[in-house]
Image (spheres, rainbow, N blue to C red):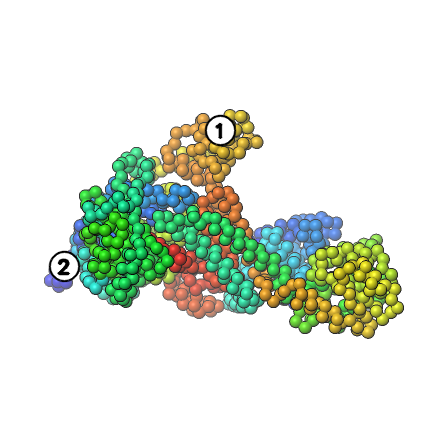
Amino acid sequence: MINDTIAAIATPAGNSGIGIIRVSGEDAKAVVDRIFVDPKNVHILSSMESHTIRYGFLLDGEDTVDEVMVSFFKGPKSFTAEDTVEINCHGGAFVLNKALELVLKNGARLALPGEFTKRAFLNGRIDLSKAEAVMDVIASDSEISLKNSLFQLRGSVFLKIKELRDDILHEIAYIESALDDPEHISFDDHKEEFEKKLNESLNAVDEMIVSSDNGRIIKDGIRTVIAGKPNAGKSSLLNLFSGSDRAIVTDIAGTTRDIIEERIKLDDITLCLTDTAGIRQTDDPVESIGVNRARQYLDNADLILFVVDSSVALDENDLEIKDLLKGKKSIVLYNKSDLEPVVSIEDIRALIPDACVIRTSALSGDGYEEFKNAVKDMFIKGNIDVGNEIIITNLRHKEALKEASDSLKNVKDSLDNSLPEDFYTVDLMNAYLFLGSIIGEEVDDDLVNKIFSEFCMGK
Amino acid sequence: MTEKNTLIEKTDICVIGAGHAGCEAALAAARLGLDTVIFTVSVESIALMPCNPNIGGSSKGHIVREVDALGGEMGKNIDKTFIQSKMLNTSKGPAVHSLRAQADKADYSKRMRMTLEEQDHLTIKQAEVCELLWEDEPVKRITGVRTYTGTTYLCKAVVICSGTYLNARCLTGEAITYTGPNGLMAATHLSDSLKEMGISLRRFKTGTPARMDGRSLDYSKMEIQNGDERIVPFSFSTDPDSVQKDQVPCYLTYTNEETHKIIRENLDRSPLFAGVIEGTGPRYCPSIEDKVVKFPDKKRHQIFIEPEGLSTNEMYLSGMSSSLPEDVQVRMYRTVPGLENCKIVKNAYAIEYDCIDPNQLYATLRFKNVEGLYAAGQFNGSSGYEEAAGQGIIAGINAAMSVLGKEEIVLDRSQAYIGVLIDDLVTKENFEPYRMMTSRAEYRLLLRQDNADRRLRKIGHDVGLVSDEEYDAYLKKEELIDKEIDRIKNVYLGAAKENQDILAGMDSAPISKSTSLAELICRPELDYRKVALLDPERPDLPDAVIDQVEIEIKYEGYIERALRQVKQFKKMEQKLIPEDINYDDVESLRIEARQKLKALRPVSVGQASRISGVSPADISVLLVYLSSR
């Protein structure tokens, strides 16, 4: 286990300007090389010198996840004394988590609490006299992590996972008791039922993985993107909602070239609000990067705020944005309502029949209350019911669920290959253990107890 | 004890008890050239089978094979004395195939006694050992034993294999006798001597069903249960052709609601339910009253009627052990189809006995606090003849090694069921007689009964229990396996019509490109024997070789995965914890973990990680601490 490659977010939680993902271990370079390219779309990491930093993009397949700086430290001259790659992402919990997930998907394992420190120590990077401190870090990190982890688990998730574990353990116990006592207990009559149960468990786990996106809505906020053609007033609206002056607001079209993330609280839910460069065709290379990224943000958004400048006629830019709204939750902000209208609300309805349209004016502050209520209607009372759903909010939980899901899929493969049932139990047990790691339960004698309590064994 | 007897004998090793653990321990020690005395309360009870009349069964059969591969006796002895044999779980994967043989009990005992009697360096002594002798300085070390008649045996190592005899009492309803199994004399003195040495004891319980007069049973009302057509021997040294013989059938019948009603009505007379029994019983062989109470929805329970041997008409009622009073037993048994007129030869009974918490032992089976003192079998809180034998041979070898000044052996969890058994006993919390189960072995795909020789023959030979002749036979077999695997990986078939026809005849898809025999064997619907028609060059090989070839090829992916897991496992096993570690110095350990570690004193980080109450974070802390020393 010592040399496998681990990754975690190395900067404190919160919305700092930059977040760092640290990847350490034998394959650190290879893992990140798979997903990092320079501006010419070349995978350059493998040829990077130690202690250098390069600019480029993190790619998930075709999609750009973030614009990043990547530095490489060859072991033993690194924090852990192993090959280490650090990815400096733009801040924002969402982007950082997404980037981390990408790293995990490409071969790293989520680091355990205190694991970087532990490796640094075991590899001789930390002075022996600090052993005491290192042990404390490991012990307290583990405790905090477990507490956080349990804190983040909603009661409904806890119960659901317990139930799933119980079901899986029952199936293992069935198989094992029949193997141990074939003359009293037969698994053959149970096979069909087993297959059904397996599929149910797998579906339930997969649903929880999917739900992690909704869980994120609660924890990290609703991913909201403000879109609109240049100078429609997006940045000033952002400022209105968030009460700060982070975005640069001028009257020259195209001044917002960066992506700006702002968290605003609407009572009990949070909007994770991103202002994008105005969507428009452009030849300016810097701005075009911004425009492309804006499109990607739109794809990933939970909610799109389409800002329409009511004082200017609708044009092809608006039509293009309209197309991007398909299949997304959206609110049209009928902006600059304090000016003489050129576009009417009816025009907008003609363009987007079901649109939820709100009159806003960044200047007067009109429309804020209405907007707030519309969002709450949409996400709390409305289409996503966050109250009762089984929701996963913690990346560690999500990873464990993915592992559980993979294990259950292995069982399915064994079934499909007509392997006898003694081959299922290793993978079933893995699924059971991964689920257990979420709720902090160990296995120990569970199985043997289950066998004896539910199956009548023996001579 | 008499004070006047001043007789002093000298030997190397004393083995207390001549059951399945004691026999293996004594034979191992004597075969390694050490003068050994084996004590038994009765020579008639050497290798006695006081409960079920069979050897092997799921996962237990694996242990017998392992004992045999190490050079033990159990496999050879049952091959000589079985009266029916069956490979269990043949429709399942190879890891859980398990051999079980019905024994002629008397013959089994007699033959084992003969083996002991013929063994050089081994003396049988009928005597109750009452006292252990030891010195405290410079370290606590065993120096000998003293018998009830006062004779002292000075020795260098002792192996305790006292089974269920220590302070034993047997219960049949209200009737209690202070005897060992089968009415034999209990050993009532040794417990005190053990306590005096600082060894803590606990009390366990087990039970056995009644034995019937076979003439009083009506087999026409039962289903007949025959053995396998082709018998596979237990021992790697037994020629398979030599064990093909006529077999004796067993029978199957069932309890019914009437049986259960009688049991329910008389629960107050069961010592188990009335609270008379204080010992903890095993859950895997519950008494019939346990089953009826715990599983009230079950309308019937299976009862296997098994012969106790060829020279007796006694029949064993597997599945109906009980501690109910005799009158209830008779009424209850007589409700079962075929048992309406049954006559009981021996009543069912429960037995309680002293044993130790095996956490006091190292995995070598030596007591942590006494040099030279080893323990094996039911005394260690296990259950079953096979589990006893598995510990017996290890304790015997290690007692001998300690006397010879050589390195003791420990089998780990990736090497043998015996390793799993001993590790569980010495590491985990154990509240009932421990029985091996296939689910306890995490690497069971590697720990198969068919490859016990591949896993352990070399160890047995290196120790000195496996003869050169046996070892050469093993090496030859290995060569055949390797050669054949290599061959079928390199025999390629083309898409010729005759090949396709043969495949179609076996409902297997045609081949589109050049395909190796090995690839075909991997198909779910095919196996090594089935592809014979496509393999005209095939050499004539023994079944045991064919089985290995088939398994190695067919399950290659799974085996490789298990091997990778073993590699991880071994890393932690090899991180040793120094004996003088002071856990109080490791401040970041959680209190529970520290207490557990202090009490158990694991030898490796791997063992520490299996102690309940020690978390992964505690293990990380421990690793950091160890590397900072």
Q: Amino acid at mark 1?
A: Ile
- The residue at the point 82 percent across, 64 percent down is A345
For residue B149, which numbered disc appears in the image?
Answer: 2
Quick one: quadrant of the N terminus of chain B?
A: bottom left
| Distance CA(mark 1)–CA(mark 2) | 76 Å
- The residue at the point 44 percent across, 53 percent down is A172
Q: Earlier in the sequence, mark 1 or mark 2?
A: 2
Q: Nearer the viewer, residue A447 or A137?
A: A447
Circles 1 and 2, Cβ within 8 Å, touching? The answer is no
Tag 1's secondary structure?
helix
Q: Is residue B506 above or below residue A5?
A: above
Q: Is residue A126 above or below residue B228?
A: below
For residue A194, which numbered disc appears in the image?
Answer: none
Tag 2's secondary structure?
loop
For residue B502, which numbered disc appears in the image?
Answer: 1
Q: Nearer the viewer, residue B593 or B60?
A: B60
Instruction: Give me the chain letter of mark 2.
Output: B
Bin the neighbour count of mark 2 within 10 Å (Cα to Cα): few under 14, some 14-19, many 20 and up: some
Judged left or right of residue A36, residue B366 is left
Instruction: Give me the chain letter of mark 1.
Output: B
- The residue at the point 85 percent across, 71 percent down is A338
| One can see residue B522 in this view | no
Q: Looking at the image, which residue sits at the far left?
A: B4
